[in-house]
Image (cartoon, rainbow, N blue to C red):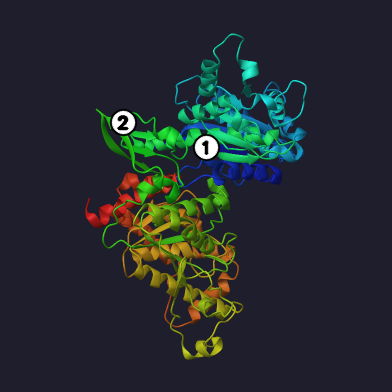
Amino acid sequence: MTVPLRIVVAFHPKSSRAKALARAVYQTFMAEGAAPGLRIPVAFLPVREDCTPPEVDFDAAEHTVLLAVIDGVMASRARASDRPVADAWAEAVVQWRARAAAAPHHAFVPAAVNEGGFGLDGNRLAEASFVRLDREGPDADEELCARIAIASLLLLPRSNAQEPSLKLFISHAKADLPPEKFEGPTKEILGWLSQTPVDAWYDVKKIAPGASFGIAIEKGVRESNGLVCVLTDHWSDREWCRREMLLAKHMGQPIVIVDAIESAIPSLFTYIGNVRLTRWAPGRARHVANAMLLEAVRSRHALEILRRIAGTRDDVVVLANRPEGPTLRRLPSGTKRVLYPDPPAPAEELAELVPTYVFTDDKPFPVELVTPLGLLARWKRPRGVDLVGISLSGATDIDHWGASEEHLATFADDLVTMLLVAGLRVAYGGTLEHGGAKNDSVNYTRRLFGLVRSYSPLVTDLEPNAVRPIENYCPWPIHLDPALDTSAYGQEGRLVDCEPPPLDARTQAALGTGHFTKTTTLQRWAYAQGASRMRRRMAADIAARIALGGKLDGYGGLIPGVLEEIYLSRCGERKTPLFLLGVFGGATRLAIDLLLGHARKEATENWALSHVPGYGELLAEFRGQAGGYASLDEVAQQWQALGTAGIAAALGNGLNEVENHELFESSDVRRLVELILLGLARKWNGV
């Protein structure tokens, strides 16, 4: 199942400026202000070792906006060794432009970071229109995101089946637009829009003399991409301003309020809430226009997702914003459910709206108001399924998979949020100091605790399932550290102290009985043994495991931590269902490749000896200690042999071969959670 819209950012991996711009696009479209399952996917092009561009799969989404961030690094031909790379990028950009031109459901946006970018291909790209970021200075990020929003709006379908257009309806009081004045928020916004491809609809310009005021305004609101309400001291007093707001809400149009109140107003219009608001200040016209464009894209994308969730049911109405009186009073006859975006409306707000009825044959019928997370909270958790383990750490090869640490962290947030809302408990091995691994730049433990804190009130208000604390497995000897911060435990997390490994008298005497540093090889061996003991304890407690990411170098033991957890799930003492999410590469992808019969050099001791610092010394310590150990080669060979029986049998997760392959490749977190819950239900309910 393809997603409605995907933004792909192409940039030279050695250009720090281009990479910073790519991350700004990611933050704007995927990380800011979106709920789990409703984010607009933003992918980076996978990084190749030779820095040449890979192929772009335009059809991975119904609509793809491909942004090429072009600069002097990409176009460099100063040395003979640079020229093949620059030529490859030039050919790719030319082909991408042609591909998008031939497919009206996709778009290509070339952006020049600096003058050097125009040297990429002076012949074939001479007539191409570039977004000129070299002229924008500190506003380059915002300009780039605005151009992507514009391209997206021209692709995404309109609910009223109109032709694509770029038009913003400016709702303002006439008193704020006197002909003798050249300043003020309304005139600044109109002046800024006049320099862009976006048309501004406002009554003085668009209503011809003698035309029907009401008909013209209704048409203007309907054909716009959104309504910008310039809220001044005069706005709420004007009848047509209030009508414009109500029309936009009736039609489901996105709205941005510009708070430009200077003193006070006697009464604020009742139906002005539940929309995005931005504060006005002189010089912020660009920000206002861009905020409206981004809101329009998010709204249209969310509607497409909600329509897919609703399916073919004709008794479900989808809304782009929280339900309100003006929208609920106009529900069509036969409506049984209103589906709106997360987060759910607060309980006190819902209490004013519920019960909602529609009349059919003069009889009232109740309508439920629900969000995707609200539907997820109704999942009937099978008996025997309670605690689910998450194997997660940063993937050192993540850029080869078209992603970044921010992608993985946001994805993990959404994944765990949905599992918690579905009524599952989540287990994770790590500490508050540094998450799953000391060199993780993302503290996953604290992030997971934060999800419990954020979503507990929402779920408790809506459904009987409460979001339960994270089971945080902490390995010996870290839990003995007197500096360990335990203040967050209780409502958000439960600390599970794991036992020490068996130690002979010599080792015990050398290490002592309390917390110790990880400095000597013996201490590093002890830490590795403590982490393995933690993983075995966790494997014995959980009902299933979900793995994603995971380091392939820089790990502390003989086997990457996430790989060891994957291995224990199916080759350990207790077999548990395993779900492998491969979109971020890392140890999880290595495990997938081995199951599929592909050789991976990172799964060999020889590779580890040359790539993992201190691996040889640690290996010698393991060999000198009693009790034996499993080598990386042995683990890899045993795991690879597991795949000969087929993927479904190897993972035992209730999913078939096709569904597991979808798990391996998909980046759609909502679909992945759907598959995980389906597999758990099949496994325990036999469905």
Q: Given the current orientation, which residue lies at the most extreme left position?
A: 686
- Residue for badge 2: 314
Category of crowding for the residue at label 2, using alpha-carbon neighbours closer than 10 angstroms: few (below 14), some (14–19), many (at least 20): few
Q: Given the current orientation, which residue lies at the most extreme front position?
A: 266
Q: Which of marks 2 and 1 is nearer the N terminus?
A: 1
User: How many callouts does the rendering have?
Assistant: 2
143 relative to 46 in the view: left or right: right
Rendering quarter of residue 176: top right
* Picture quarter with the N terminus: top left
Q: Is mark 2 on a helix, strand or loop?
A: loop
* Percent position of residue 663, x then y: 39, 48
* Percent position of residue 169, x then y: 59, 25
Question: Identity of the amino acid at label 2?
Answer: Asp
Can the viewer see residue 54 in this picture? no
Rendering quarter of residue 192: top right
Question: Identity of the amino acid at label 1?
Answer: Thr
- Residue for badge 1: 270
Instruction: Name the residue rendered at 51%, 16% in the picture.
Output: 215
